[in-house]
Amino acid sequence: MAISQDLLEILACPACKAKVELKPDGSALKCVQCHRVYPIRDDIPVMLVDEAKIENETADEPQEQT
């Protein structure tokens, strides 16, 4: 069972209180402001700051070599 849209609308990042969005693979929720990624375990979002990982926006972009 996936996270419902109704639940997504009321959830907020516990660190900065911004909106969270479901990652494309459905494995986690990502904060749109501070980029913390909260895991989803057994269809339950784990909204604990200590469990979150910070994901950079530039992580998907290729690195420049110097």
Image: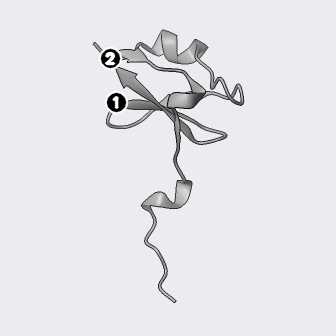
Residue in the image at 65% along x and 41% along y: 34
Residue in the image at 34% along x and 31% along y: 27
**Dot placed on the residue nearer the N-terminal end, 2 or 1:** 2
Pick the front one: 41 or 22: 41
User: In which quadrant of the rendered view does residue 31 lie?
Assistant: top right
For disc 2, the marked residue is: 2
Q: Amino acid at mark 2?
A: Ala
**In the shown orientation, is residue 39 left or right of residue 49?**
left
**In the shown orientation, is residue 26 left or right of residue 11?**
left
At label 2, counting other C-alpha atoms closer than 10 Å, the crowd grade (few under 14, some 14-19, many 20 or more) is: few
Pick the front one: 57 or 55: 55
Up-down: is 57 above or below 6?
Answer: below
Q: How is the image coloured?
A: one colour
Q: Find numbered disc 1 in the image and state the secondary structure of the residue it sits on.
A: loop
Q: Amino acid at mark 1?
A: Gly
Up-down: is 45 above or below 63?
Answer: above
Up-down: is 25 above or below 57?
Answer: above
User: In which quadrant of the rendered view does residue 1 lie?
Assistant: top left
Q: Find numbered disc 2 in the image and state the secondary structure of the residue it sits on.
A: loop
What numbered label is drawn on residue 52? none
Q: Position of residue 57 (x, y in %)?
A: 54, 54
Residue in the image at 54% along x and 53% along y: 56
Residue in the image at 62% along x and 21% along y: 12
The reply to whether callout 2 and callout 1 are in contact (CB within 8 Å) is yes
**In the shown orientation, is residue 55 left or right of residue 25?**
right
For disc 1, the marked residue is: 26
Up-down: is 66 above or below 60?
Answer: below
In three-dimensional space, the C-alpha distance between marks 2 and 1, rounded to whole angstroms, equals: 8 Å
Query: How many labels were placed on the picture?
Result: 2
